[in-house]
Each structure stands twice: as structure tokens, then as C-alpha cells.
Image: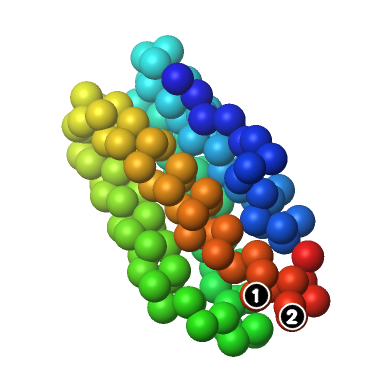
Amino acid sequence: MLLVWTENLTVGVEEFDQEHKKLIAMVNELHGAIEAGDSKETLGIVLDQLENYARHHCLREELLFIKTGYPDAPAHMKEHDELRQMLAGLRERHESGLRARLSVEVMDFIYGWFTNHICCTDKKYSEHMHANGVF
Ligand SMILES: [Fe+2]
């Protein structure tokens, strides 16, 4: 099953909606590469791309939290830390050759982190950002 971005996932900040769409596409790409039995090298590249883009995206959100004085920033950034650690862990395990493990953990990652974080944690900043003129 693939993740799909729908209107109910909108966070009301154009840049972040676009980034979330791209992240979801990258998660799906990784999932597809695992399902297709792509080579370790290919999986490694797709995983690296996802990790780099996720880091970029989390940082963009965090910079805006700081700039606008977002009160829920600490809790939100803690969730980002969990994502960064999870992706780094996946990449390390992949590099050390534990391919079977990657599939199971990516599934947890897809259903656990992305659905919960975008729908619920990210959405919480919409009102704050709009009040600060960020759309
Ligand atoms: Fe976030």
C-alpha cells in the first residue's frame, strides 16, 4: 500500500505542503524499490535521498519555528529528532547488509511516522503560521 497526499493533510503553508508531497513520493519510491527487489546500491541511493530530503524539510520547519517563536517547537522538534534517528538507523543497517530488516522497518516508518506527524503534529502550526503572515 502506498501513501497518498490528500487535502486533509494540508498544513496551510505552501512550501511545506509541497515538501510533504515530495517526501511521500520518496517514501513510496523507497517502498517500491524494496518490493521490486532492487539492488542494494539502488536501495541505498533511494534511502539516502529520502534521508537528505527529510533532514532538509525538518530544518526548514524548525527555522520557521524559531523565526516566528512557535511555542510547540520543542515537542515538534523532538518528533523530527526521532525521524532523523530512524532514517539514520535504517541507512546504517542497510549499509551493514541487513536488507530484510529494511523492509519491515520502512513499513513501520511509513505508517507510523508520516501519517501521524503530518496529519497531527504539523497541522498544529497552521494557525500560528497564519497569525504570523506565513501561508
Ligand atoms: Fe514537522
Label 1 SS: helix
| Image position, residue 61 (x, y; %) | 59, 67
Say few, some or many: other residues with alpha carbon within 10 Å of mark 1 (under 14 / 14 to 19 / 20 or more): some
Count of marks placed on residues: 2
| Image position, residue 130 (x, y; %) | 74, 71
| Image position, residue 96 (x, y; %) | 21, 39
Residue 128 - label: 1
Q: Is residue 7 visible?
A: yes
Identify the residue at image location x=39%, y=16%.
35
| Image position, residue 55 (x, y; %) | 50, 59
Identify the residue at image location x=48%, y=60%.
121
Asked if the residue under mark 1 is in contact with the one under mark 2, i.e. CB atoms within 8 Å, the reply is: yes
Identify the residue at image location x=33%, y=31%.
107
Residue 57 shown left or right of residue 106 in the figure: right
Q: Quadrant of the N terminus?
A: top left
Amino acid on which the number 2 mark rests in the picture: Asn
Q: Indicate the colouring scheme.
A: rainbow
Q: Quadrant of the C terminus?
A: bottom right
Q: Which residue is mark 2?
A: 132
